[in-house]
Amino acid sequence: MRNERITSANVAHQPKSDGSRQSILRRFSCDDEIIAAIPVFGGMHGSWNPSLGKAIPTMAGMAEGRFLAMTLTTLMRIFAVSQAVMLSAWFGIMMYSIIFVQRFQLRSAEPDAVEDIFQQIAHGARKMALQTIAVIAVTGTGLAVTRALITPGPSAEWIVLMCVKLVLFLVACATFVYQSWWVWPKRIFAPPDEMPRVRIEFLAAAIVIAVSLGSMIAVDVLAASV
């Protein structure tokens, strides 16, 4: 009987270390929502570390922030590249029109004989230009929004350059509208004696558009370094 009592007492006073050394599932919440059920292991000698439950939500928030920053950066680069391509394409078309097509016609001995060819070349250019303007406007807006959301935010110099770029874009669009809906109809229906003046007016509008687009590209190059 005495041996049985001693054995029972020893069993009753044995430390319950086996259960404390095993991993258990604990639930933690962040913003009153259950995040996950994860195994939390004890520290040295099987003791629990309560700080783990507080650190895991912070780590999850940091990972989410990094993912959002990477997404915004990727979108910003896509917008920037797309806009650079469209600006370069429009600028190249305008320079080709000025240097080769219109310059050739002005220097030709018989410019009226080349007029029909010029009008055939320009056929459908208005629709393509409008599509290009739409893409530049959408990508420019997306570029500005994504850049503003990225931390750290844009510098004051970058904001000033983007305002200058916006003004140049509006000048290019307004000049295109004037050239396409005012000068071009005059060029089609102008009598022969007024045609030289209309051609010069059309060329001047094209030069303004080309200078505005080239300046926008230069502003983008400067903005990439600030």
Image (cartoon, rainbow, N blue to C red):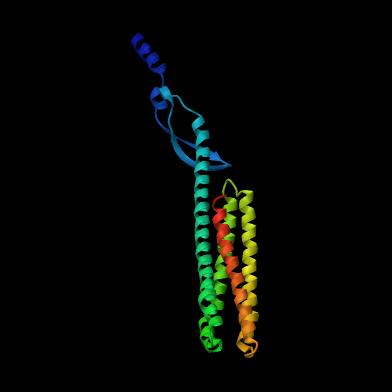
Q: Is residue 180 visible?
A: no
Closest to the observer, 151 or 210: 210
Residue positioned 56% across, 58% down in the render: 220
**Residue closer to the observer: 155 or 92:** 92
- From the top left corner, tell me how far across and down residue 165 is, in percent: 61, 60
Looking at the image, is 74 positioned above or below residue 89? above
Q: Does residue 70 sit above or below 193 in this rendering? A: above
**Residue 56, position in %: x, y?**
50, 37
Percent x, y for residue 219? 58, 58
**As displayed, is residue 149 above or below residue 39?**
below
| Front position in the image: 203 or 60 | 203
**One can see residue 47 in this view:** yes
Image-based side of 121 in relation to 44, left or right = right
Total number of numbered discs in the rendering: 0
Q: Quadrant of residue 200?
A: bottom right
Query: Relative to 127, does residue 223 appear above or below in the rendering?
Result: above
Does residue 58 appear left or right of residue 185 in this picture?
Answer: left
Which part of the image, by quadrant, shows the N terminus? top left
Question: Residue 188, how many percent across, how many down?
Answer: 60, 87
The foreground one among 161 and 41 is: 161
